Each structure stands twice: as structure tokens, then as C-alpha cells.
Amino acid sequence: MGASFLRSSLLLSLLFYSGWYNYYFPVSAAPKYRTLEGSVEQFWHVSDLHLDNTYHLTDDRTKVCASSKGRNASEPGIYGDFMCDSPYQLILSAFNYMKQSQQQASFMIWTGDSPLHVPVNELSTKMVINYIGNMTSTILNFFPDMQVFPSLGNHDYWPQDQLPVLPNEIYSAVAKLWKPWLTDEAISTLKKGGFYSQIYKSHTIQQPLRIISLNTNLYYSPNQATVNMTDPANQLEWLEDTLESSSQKKEMVYIIAHVPIGYLPYARNTTAIRKYYNERLVTLFRKYSSVIAGQFYGHTHRDSLMVLLDEKGIPVNSLFVTPAVTPIKKLANLESNNPGIRLYQFDPTDYSLQDLRQYFLNLTEANLKKEANWKLEYILTDAYSIQDLQPESLHGLVKQFGESQSKQFQNYYKHYIVSYDSSFVCEGHCKTTQVCAIQYLDEASYTDCITGGGTVNLKSR
């Protein structure tokens, strides 16, 4: 690491540990345009940073980090531990790698969750704002000229998960923090309900791309603030109006949010958001699939994809869940994830997704060598021998996943846990749950898929 990087790390650490931060780094209001030679442009996707500012190395492994909740850290090192959320050094190494890679990115999407996983009484509104502010300042410091499109996560509020339908202190604070990136119109709706839309204008063509950043935390099952509400914060009405307007104006749309739609790939018959809202969103996304060029989520900490099918079973949308930077796992889980960051490639003439590059940090190796050697984990089209990331291509791939002894699915599951441990296998009940979640996002079709069933067969060789 260079001296300037270490100085930046120290400065940002001091800002956070002292309990304050700058809302604004000196940045240009208009991001510089970056493009690639050839027919594609690129954008970064980062999610679930989950900074644990208590992380430190000590002989008492129960006290390495607050996010372990008193449990023993497994093999703690300077870049973290699988029982803990991200130390600051891990997050800095991720952004440093992105910057030093010199990949030409047109923009970045950041799909939420800055604070650590701790009990409610260990955080406060002020602390949550500090965490979001620190991560915002960090991104601005590394990428002062890049357009960033952020969204709120379920931990970006206090108490966690309870994001409200009315203006509040956190929505207002976040609107100020994200002002370097967002228009006045976007900030206005962000303050009201935690969501917004904004145009990204490519410099190569006139057709604009609209980023719609949803607050899907309003639909998250643990959110007691929205129980029995038909349309929390009127976001669904706003979303349909926005998509209809984009359709009329011939805009293309990227949907970004923290909590994904569809069914969880690791928990059978369980949607990530409440089923009522999931059905509403699936219906909307089918209706406007011709203008939606991609959907991007976080939250699960794993690497997964989904294909939205219409009522006739025709693939109409590609959806991606990017893995987390935090490596934390639940005590009951056998597997976790290595830290990951992602770079998408798209065709600037129509914003169609062409490919993605997934990067990861082998956390065990990084701690042993005391060096953060981020690497390319896979290029999706190369890893699965498909043409692009269009719904038809992904649907063909998913059909291969369903085959008996599918090597493609074995490869997918390795990527799902971000190369955490190649000895883990997903078969039987586990595989059925995964494959059904990938291609059936509504209740009726998912239930039909699951009917085939299977026995639990997740094991280590």
C-alpha cells in the first residue's frame, strides 16, 4: 500500500472514531465521464459494507468485535474474521483495489447497509448516521469524480429494520450526505420515503438511463412500521408512475434496492420481502419489463442471480444479487462468503447487460500474508459459456443447473459463497430450493417448482 493510501486510511479512521465526519469532501458536482474503447461501458456495484469500528486484534477472541456478540472469533487478522463484520481496513482495501485497478467505470451503485450487526441497544440514530456518513465520505474520498447511486439498507436505520413511511432524522441526514450525487428532485423523495429516481446520461447516445432506487426495506418482513399497509409511503404508486413515464419517454431503467424481490435461495418458501409486496412488484416488473434493463440488489451477502419470467414462462428480466464486503456469518451457518465487489459491463446504446466481473478477497490468505490481494473470481460469460447477461441467456443457463450432476450448478454454488470453501456441495433439497428461487419469483410458479421437492443434502465432502 502506498503512503497516500495509508494517510487517507488514518484520516478517515480518526474522523470516525472521534464521532464526526465531513458531510462533503471537496468533489466536483459533475462527475467526469469515463468510457471504454469499444462497445461497452462499465459500472461498479458494492453492497453490505457493515463497518465494525470495534474490531481489533486481542488475545481474548470473545472481544475481537462487537458484531460477534461475545462468540469466539475464528481466525482474526488485520482484514477481519468470518465471525465479525468488516474492519475498516477491509473496506479501505476494497475501495483501494477498485481505484488502483484503473477500470474505467461510468458510475457506481451502492445498495446499502453501513452499520454493524449488533443488538438494538448498542446503536442509536446518531451512530447509524455516523456509520452511513463515514462510508459516504470514504467513497467520496476514493472516487471524488464518480457518479454514485446509493440505496438504503435495513440496517441503515435505528432501530434496525424499522424504516418508516414518513420523513425522519435519518432520511434527512442521508439526503444531505448524498447531495454530491443526487439531484434536488431525487433528494426530495429520498427525504419523504427513502427512495428516488434519477437520470444517468450517457455521453455516447441521447437515450437516457433512469436509475430507480427503491426502499424495499418498507416491505421487509421484520419491519413492524409497515404491517398491514397497502402501499407504504405510496412507493408502489410512485414506482408505477415512474415506470410509465419512462415507457412514454423511451427511457431505459435500472432498478436498484437493498432487499431483493423473489424467494430466498437458502430458505424454502420464504420471500425476502412480504409476499403481498413481492406479488405487487413482480406484476409491475413484468408489465414494464421492456423498459427495465436490469435489477440489482444486496442484503443476502451471497452471490446469486434470478430470471423474471412472464405469465407464459418467457424470460423478460435479469436480476442480480451482489455478495457482501462483510464476511460475517451466523453461528448456525456452515458456510459464509469471502468479501466481494462487482463490475458490470453494458452496451451504451441500449443499456443491455453484457457481462460482469466478480472480484473477491480470500480472507484467510489475506490475514496470513497481511496483504489484501483482491483477485478476479470469475467473468460470468466465460465461467458459464453464455453469450451475455440477457434474460434468454440466463434462462438457458438455469435450465442446465436443473440437470442431474450439473457441473454448471456446482460452479454456481462455488460462486454463491464467493469461493469460501470448495468442499461444500448443494444437492437434493438444497439444489431444488436454489434452482426454484432463481427462476420463479411469484408464489404460484415457485410453489409448482418446489412441489418436486428433495431431501436436505448440504454437506462437506
Image (spheres, rainbow, N blue to C red):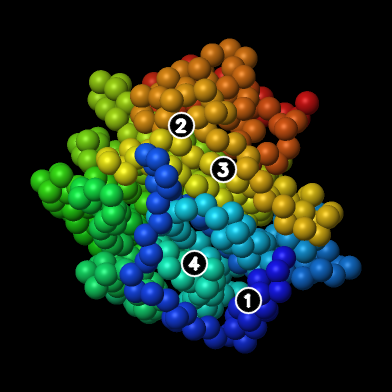
Which of label 2 and label 4 is nearer to you? 4
For image coordinates 42% across by 20% down, the residue present is 396
Question: Which dot, 2 or 1, sits closer to the camera?
Answer: 1
3D distance between C-alphas at marks 1 and 4: 13 Å
Residue position marked by numbered label 3 in the rendering: 358
Q: Position of residue 339 (x, y in %)?
A: 64, 51
Q: Amino acid at mark 4?
A: Phe
User: Relative to 78, does residue 101 appear above or below in the rendering?
Assistant: above
Q: What amino acid type should be assigned to the residue bearing mark 1?
A: Ser
Q: From this view, report whether residue 431 is shown above or below residue 144.
A: above
Specify few, some or many for label 2: CA neighbours under 10 Å numbering under 14, 14-19, or 20 or more.
Answer: many
Numbered badge on residue 412: none
Say what secondary structure mark 4 lies in.
loop
Mark 2: which amino acid?
Answer: Ala
Dot 1 or dot 4: first in sequence order is 1
Spatial CA distance of label 2 from label 4 is 35 Å
Q: Say which residue appears at 12% left-offset and 48% top-offset.
A: 249
Q: Nearer the viewer, residue 405 or 381?
A: 381
- Residue bearing the label numbered 4: 143
**Residue denoted by label 1:** 8
Most extreme residue toward the top is: 404
Q: Earlier in the sequence, mark 3 or mark 1?
A: 1
Say which mark, if any, is on residue 437. 2
